[in-house]
Amino acid sequence: MGHWTPSSEYSDSGPKKTTYDKDGSGVPTQGRVRQIVKSNTQNPKGWEYYELEIAEVLEVFDSEEKLPENDKGEKIWGLLGCIKARPHQSEKDKIVAKLKIYQPLDMNMTKMPLRNEHVVIVKYLNNHYYLPVVSMLGSVNANIIPGTSGFRDQKMIDDDFIYDFFEANKDFGNDEKVRRLIPREGDVTLEGRFGNTIRFGSAIVEGAHGDDTSTQDSPNILMRVGQLTDAQLFDEQNLRQELEDTNFKPAEENINSDGSSIWMTTDQKVNLDIEETNADDHSYMSSFHEDDQPNVGGKQITINSDRITFNTKRGKILGFSHDGIGFSTKKAFTVDADDGMNINTGGATSMDMRPGGISLITPGNSRLDLGEGGKEGGPDVIYLSSECPSFLTLDDKAHLESCKGANVHLDDCAGLYTDNGSYFKIGGSNDEAVIYIKGRDDVKEQHLVFGEELANLLDSICNSFIELGGTILDLNGIATGAGPSGPISSGPANQALITAWETGVETIRARICNILTKVDI
């Protein structure tokens, strides 16, 4: 198609013509007739014919190395993105050196053509422009058909389908595995060459993207890169195979099997598969967040990829959520914070993790402080503190264990006691124990030096009493110079007396242990 329009290069600078009488009365003179005819006749030198024409791209200035140079040997950066193309009709067979340079008509949205693709060209205001690639093969990947505009030397023929980086199939002129998107009613799509797309659509078509409903007023933007690159991970190889087996069959975005996706939706179910990424035990997620997933629909943004990175060069990353924040992972969840980390729950319980220690504070002002000593290079210190009454409850197998030299520090009049009334206070040196004894107001405290040895000694005395009583009560007589004095007892027949003696000694032993370790509280 084409049209005539005034030439941008023509200007009438010749001598002014004689002006004839413009009085419209009477019969026009010969000069007046000539003036009228000339004033209504366009000078052919002042008009141009503009035509849109198909041209084959023969050079593309898409890198610094390919840019032409000016007279000073400097690269002409203004030509970056421009092409040399040969029109099929007006310049058929013209050599490349004499071809015009065309610049993109729209500088804000440029689709860089490949050599031997085809574009629409036009001249306007003495400038030559090209429009986007013509879809001669119906492919979003490439539409390469070499030699349609005429003469080619051997080098041009040898360079067919050979590019700096792009790989093209010589049999098809494109990568037939990269397919266009399935168009949906009312959608606007932007599609790149490599399976990267943006769809400005909606959820009004039932069955689209796995949503079995049709919803009006549901605008969405679906962005994805990598068409079905992860189909095998989700057992969807059949989707790729169907594309390969059916020529020109379009594809649909797949939140799971595409390489990376960002879906912004207002009322659409997103069937995200988290089976291989969710923790084996996600009971916290289930109990606190009810396993809320994108497939419930509603306004949401779903991002899916192998890695998601958030980084701020100078500022912060802030997150706010009305209904909670949940994380679930099969691997470790770690946080590195040079200046510490603070956690607050309900404005009452807080955890302050700072360089050198951790503090946990509860609403009742109970505290657990760890690691205060370590910040100065010394051993860590642990503090447990609370408003009275305070308890440390251990189960039946629990114990307190520490390295040599550790102390359990109790305040004045405090001690360790058990449910049966045993009571013990530790103090003084390693061999000293302080015992509180009920009813001994005159003594208050008894200090047992080498208390363990004293206990062993008293235990030996009790054993000696038992042996002595058994020996005496078992005698048959007393030896004298004149012989035995006669029977003192009936010997073994006095076993009841021996047993009573032993019981009395054991009672004394128990009272000694009670004095050392027990008081009735």
Image (cartoon, rainbow, N blue to C red):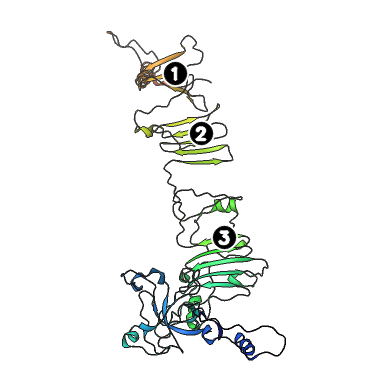
Q: Residue furthest left?
A: 481
Q: Is residue 505 visible?
A: no
Mark 2 Cα-neighbour bin, 10 Å: few <14, some 14–19, many ≥20: few
Check contact, mark 2 vs mark 3: CB within 8 A.
no
Query: Is 156 placed left or right of 207 in the picture?
Result: left
> Cβ–Cβ below 8 Å for labels 1 and 3?
no
Q: State how far apart marks 2 and 3 are (Cα).
A: 47 Å
Q: Nearer the viewer, residue 179 or 276?
A: 179
**The disc labelled 2 sits on which kind of residue?**
Thr
Q: Which mark is residue 1?
A: none
The reply to whether residue 336 is in sight is yes
Q: Secondary structure at mark 1?
A: strand
User: Dot 1 surroundings within 10 Å: few (below 14), some, or many (20 or more)?
Assistant: many
Instruction: Please report whichever mark, 1 or 2, sits nearer to the chain's N-terminal start.
Output: 2
Q: Quadrant of residue 97?
A: bottom left
Identity of the residue furthest to the right in this view: 25
Q: Helix, strand or loop at disc 3?
A: strand
**Residue that mark 1 sits on:** 435
Instruction: Give the residue type at disc 1.
Output: Ile
Q: Is label 1 or label 2 in front?
A: 2
Q: Is residue 288 above or below residue 152?
A: above
Q: Residue 95 occupies which quadrant of the picture?
A: bottom left
- CA separation in Å, label 1 and label 3: 69 Å
- Label placed on residue 301: 3
The local secondary structure at tag 2 comes to: loop
